[in-house]
Structure formats: C-alpha cells, structure tokens
Image (cartoon, coloured by chain):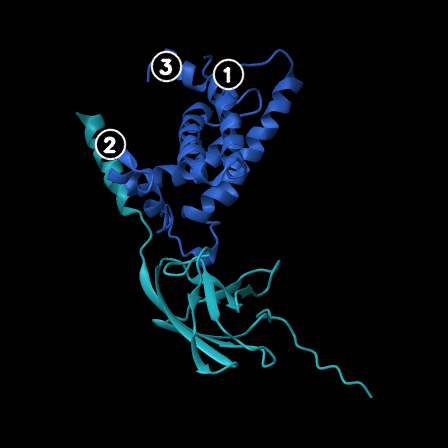
Chain colours: A cyan, B blue
Amino acid sequence: MKPYICSIIITLLACSCVQKTYKKTVVYQLLTPNDTAITKVSIKGSDKPLSWQQDSALTVVVKDSLYTVTITTTTGYKFTEVKFLVNGVLELQNQNNRRVVFADGDTTYYKAVFNVAPNSIIINKYVN
Amino acid sequence: MPSSLLKSVIKPIILPYWWQDALLCIPRIVCGYLFAADFGAAKFGMPWSPADNNLQLFEVAFWFPGDVAQYGGIFAMFPAFFAWMGAFSEAVGGIFLMLGLATRPFSLLLVCTMLVAAFLQQSGNGMWNMLPALGFLWITLYTMLMGSGRFGVDYIIAKKLRL
C-alpha cells in the first residue's frame, strides 16, 4: 500500500510544481523610416498571441512614421522577444531579437525605431 | 533493497583497460553538464536557472505542460506530471549523470525523455531538428546499460559495498 501512496503524493507534488503565470500587456510603438512608402507594419514574437511564423499588424498613429499595437500575453517569464516588419521585411536580420523586459505593473510601454538595435549608438557624422 | 538488485543497478560494467573507461566517460560528463546547465535549467527551476525565466526551485516552466499535452494520449491526460518528470530528468538527472551516481536509473529516465523529445516533439520538424535529442539518446543508452564505468561515484560505492 505504501508505494501507491508515495506515488500519488509524488504525482500531486509534481503537478503542483508548475510555474505560475500572469497576464502582461505591452504597448509597442514603432518609429519607421521616413523615406519609405509604407503599406504594412507588423510584429513577430515568441509569446502567444504573437508567433515567429505569423505576423500581427500594427495600427497607424502617424502615416509613414509612427505605428502602435497592444499585446496581452499570459506568461511566467519576466521578458518576451519580438521583431518588427515593414512592408514584409524583417528588421535586425542576423541579429538578436528585441528583448522586452516587463515592468513591475501590468502594462509595459516599449518604444522602438525600426531596424535600430535597442542598445546601438547612433553616431551623427559631420563632414566639413 | 536486496543486494542483487542494488548490484544490478549500481555496479558498472568495467572495460578491460582504464583508458577505455576514461574515453567513454567524456560524452557522459559533457552530456550531463549540458542537461544540467543548459537544456534542463532553462525549463526546470535550479539555482543556476536564468533569472529572467522566473523559475522557483524545482518548478517546471509554464509553457512546457502545454507542449507535452499536444503529444496526445497519456501525455494529454497528465501533462503537468510528464512535463515535470521530463524537465526533472534533464536538470537533476544531468547532475547525476555527470557524477556517475545512480547512473542507470537516471539514464533510463533520460532515455524515455529523449525518445519523447525526438519522436513526439521534433519528428514533425525534420531529421535535423531530431538530431540533438537523438545524440543524447545514444549516450544515455550506453550509460543505461554500462553504468558509470570506472570514473563515477557508482564505481566507488560498488567497491565500498563489495558488490
């Protein structure tokens, strides 16, 4: 009888040791290059409802300049990963994904410039 | 535990020359390290799991039971249990494999986990994606049969207990 009780206890313990999840909302804002006629801006990412297979569209705030989307995901992690697309072209190719670390509250605001890595330094070069 | 059972579980098969055991312990230790430090720790709460993964000790990652449930059958009936066992076998089993302690039981757990990973999780993604799990399967298959060899804690225990 003892082994059966032990097995049941171990099973119950194992089932209860699943990481807790919570809902996190991220408001993404994307600045796009001004010299491009934009037909579609979208996002791919690692946590549902986003995926790396299918992109989700951003809505226009300022045409050909500023786009936004709000994504709510159920996760246990402290971060998610995304990349943006303009006219179907994926940004930051052969580079790491954008790592979005969630804020302590429910909602995180993430501002990005298309195809500019989050920690990259933009150097303005002046020629005399 | 009866001595004969303990002997068959713990006592390793020893090869004729020490260098043969030394050679075969390399893939066992590397495989154990990769399981414990990387593959297992990413989805099972260990002290060295990545902090951003937000895992408590011995907790399985939130997404893993959902993945396991998609395999269907018995996995869909007890997804949390199988997810926990799979992640445990990698993270904790990896340490035991590295040390060569209780090598055969943990190798058996890892063989089961790798069979599921190769033929249920990755089979739809082509042979290339099945290769990592298959590679680990070949290693844990021989450690399941042979035990730790000379270079493992099982060998020392077997010697002390005169098995």
Left or right, B69 with respect to A82, comes to left
Query: Dot 1 lies on which element?
Result: helix
x, y percentage for residue B32?
A: 52, 35
- Label 1 amino acid? Lys
Q: Residues within 10 Å of mark 3 (few under 14, many from 20)?
A: few
Q: Which residue is mark 3?
A: B5
Q: Which residue is mark 1?
A: B159
Residue B121, visible in the rendered structure: yes
Q: Residues within 10 Å of mark 1 (few under 14, many from 20)?
A: few
Ranked by sequence position, the earlier of labels 3 and 1 is 3
Looking at the image, residue B147 lies above or below residue A110: above
x, y percentage for residue B112?
A: 40, 29
Camera-nearest label, 3 or 1: 3
Q: Which residue is mark 2?
A: A7
Query: Dot 3 lies on which element?
Result: helix
- Label 3 amino acid? Leu
| Residue at the left extreme, as displayed | A1
x, y percentage for residue B63?
A: 36, 50
